[in-house]
Image (spheres, helix red, strand yellow):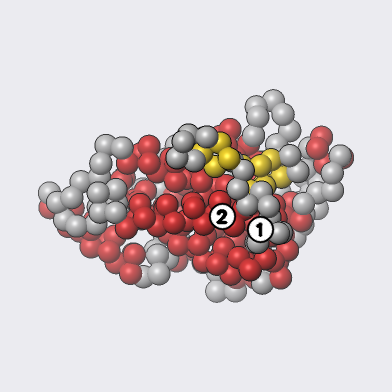
Amino acid sequence: MVASSNILTYVALSRSMQRSGPRGPKRSPTPTSTTFPTSVSGGDSMPPPSPSSTSAPKPLYLCSPFVEAALVKGNFKTIVMLPKYVDIMEWVAVNVFDFFQNLNMFYGVISECCTQQSCPSMSAGPALNYTWINQDRKSVQLPAPTYIDYVMTWVQNLLDDENTFPTKSGHEFPPTFPQTIKHVYRQLLRVFAHIYHAHYPAILHLRSEPHFNSLFAHFLAFGREYELLDIKDVRGTPGQPAIGIGALWERWKDMGILEGQ
Ligand SMILES: [Zn+2]
């Protein structure tokens, strides 16, 4: 195929450019001063109409101004769309690579506050703990830093595996690629969820909430666009009030920065 070498050049180029391709042109030169557009369904200083907000204090990441802090203005639909002449597998691969690198960088910065003592479980909300499936297919509780280390090492190994993420000309993506990406996506979502739940003060302390919010909103928009993300994993149990990042997702939908579904 004539086009494939161009795509590979593009992929190689974006991977060598600090993986900033898809977001680059949309970045604001003054990151901390940009906010998401204000709510389309009421004042943005109002709490979300969630029944759960009466029972527990609202997490900081759902509060103004943090919930609106962003590097990207407007809806994320435009930056997740498949560019012309780019193969969809390549587009998914390069974006997942980008999400992983950025998330890994954030976690690296805050990892000193994520210890066996501070985070004895992989929690993402008051009653939400993720379990790890071990080699015997048993579901086990792990301290968050161990869990996240397993996830990041596993994803890094996949990214480095030429059979899973082919980078050389003539190498095709395996038929299992979509399934693999969905697994990766679900696990990266859990890492985001843990950081939001347990380490948001550290993100605020670094004044990185615009960057972190934009990364996560981009990750969600991309995951929904290419059906890599099961809505149940984001939103929680259907019919129940959304908790944790599910509430954040709903808030961003209300604000018009994420699509309805
Ligand atoms: Zn932690």
Say above or below: 31 vs 103: below
The residue type indicated by label 1 comes to Gln
Q: Residue at x 38, y 41 (%)?
A: 180
Q: How many other residues sit within 10 Å of disc 2, few (<14), some (14-19) or many (≥20)?
A: some
Residue 201 appears in which quarter of the rendering? Answer: bottom right
Q: Residue at x 29, y 54 (%)?
A: 161
Viewer can see residue 223 = no
Q: How many other residues sit within 10 Å of disc 1, few (<14), some (14-19) or many (≥20)?
A: few
User: Residue 189: horizontal and vertical position, in percent?
Assistant: 55, 47
Which of 254/210 is in front?
210
Q: Which residue is mark 1?
A: 116
Q: Is mark 1 within 8 Å of ligand 1?
A: no
Which of 41/186 is in front?
186
Counting every numbered tag in the picture gives 2
Image quarter in which the C terminus is found: top right
User: Residue 73: horizontal and vertical position, in percent?
Assistant: 58, 59
The residue type indicated by label 2 comes to Thr
Q: Residue at x 32, y 41 (%)?
A: 177
Q: Is residue 75 left or right of residue 209?
A: left
**Circle 1: element type:** loop
| Furthest residue toward bottom | 29
Q: Which residue is mark 2?
A: 146
| Furthest residue toward right | 54
User: Residue 149: horizontal and vertical position, in percent?
Assistant: 51, 57
Q: Residue at x 19, y 57 (%)?
A: 168
From mark 1 to mark 2, how far is it between C-alphas? 8 Å
Which of 174/28 is in front?
174
Viewer can see residue 150 = yes
The answer to which of marks 1 and 2 sits earlier in the sequence is 1
Circles 1 and 2 in contact, beta carbons < 8 Å? yes
User: Residue 19: horizontal and vertical position, in percent?
Assistant: 40, 65
Which of 127/145 is in front?
145
